[in-house]
Amino acid sequence: MYKEYPPCSLLSPYIDKYWEFKGNPEYGMRINILPDGCTDFIFTLGEATQTVDGRLTMKPYRSYFIGPMNSYSELVAYAETIHMLGVRFLPSGLSRFIQLPLHELTNQRICADEVTNFFDASFAERLCEEDNFRDRIKIIEELFIKSLYKYDLQTDPQIAFAIEQINRHQGKLPVQSLVEDICLCQRQFERKFKMNTGYTPKIYSRIMQFKNAVDLLRSATCDNLLSTAVHAGYYDVPHLSREIKRMSGNTPYSFLALPSPEEEVTLTYVEA
């Protein structure tokens, strides 16, 4: 079971969503987690132990940080139960609460206490003491709202503008156009963008283009991949197929087989 919960209005400029993944997967089940330009803090609430890309073993009642990904990540379940709760930050949204050099943490999956003391060692245990998802979210939101008023951290307005423009144009806006609009030299713009998002503007645009392509595939009423490729800004079907495979580990047809976004709640997770 996968479900999502939106942040309150005070936190919505910085947090994309809260999510919960809970269930009884088959032993050894593999799940591909797709790149979306965001970063996550994940809290393991159950008895489960999972591995991420064969590198990180997620143990019970711990907090983890998942850095910005430029390709899919594979989670393998080696337990009878899984229960995880996550906070997904919008690109550059984390900087309003914690100053992290995200360009150094791209594709990193590590224990939260290795990057910040924002969550103490008992935080996941506190979440487990609550009976339901909403009460756990309330504890998380109280912490972030307190941080809004306690620390004078700000998101970079130029980078926020650049992200908004890339998202609006679904990754198809030339980087040079952004540089001209923001009035920064290209080197300075790319340095600031990487610091705040973990990506170069070109790679972030590539991820947004991929996300749009997946949305088009999921909403398609037929398997006309050429039409999808053209609308998503790819040269042709082979170009679309290569990008989908590199970013998700799957073929475009695997997304055509999924329910539409209105019917499907597990949008982030695609079984390999």
Image (spheres, grey):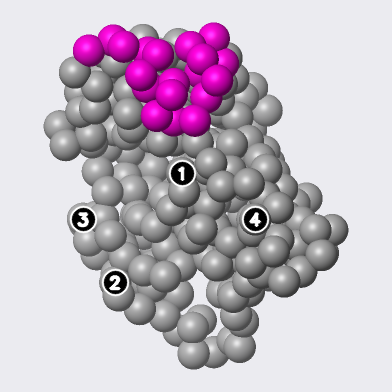
Q: Nearer the viewer, mark 2 or mark 3?
A: 2
Residue at (32, 38) in percent of width and height: 21
Amino acid type of the residue tagged 2 in the rendering:
Cys
Q: Earlier in the sequence, mark 2 or mark 4?
A: 2
User: Would you place residue 162 above or below residue 234 in this image?
Assistant: below
Give the magenta part as a residue range. Answer: 222-240
> Mark 2 near mark 3, Cβ–Cβ under 8 Å?
no
Query: Which label number is shown at residue 177?
Result: 4
Seen as rendered, the residue at the extreme right is 187
Residue at 55 percent across and 67 percent down: it is 161
Which labelled disc corresponds to residue 170?
Answer: 1
Q: Residues within 10 Å of mark 3 (few under 14, many from 20)?
A: few
Our reading of the magenta stretch's main secondary structure is helix
- Residue holding disc 2: 8
Instruction: Decide which of tag 1 and tag 3 comes sooner along the chain.
Output: 3
* Residue, disc 3: 132
The percent position of residue 49, horizontal first and vertical second, equals 49, 30
Chain-order first, disc 4 or disc 1: 1
Compare marks 2 and 1 and give the one earlier in the sequence. 2
The amino acid type found where label 3 is placed reads: Asn
Q: As displayed, is residue 185 above or below residue 110?
A: below
Callout 1: few (<14), some (14-19), or many (20+) C-alpha neighbours within 10 Å? many
Is label 1 in a helix, a strand or a loop?
Answer: loop
Task: Give the alpha-carbon distance from disc 4 to disc 1, as whole Å.
Answer: 14 Å
The quadrant in which the C terminus is found is top left
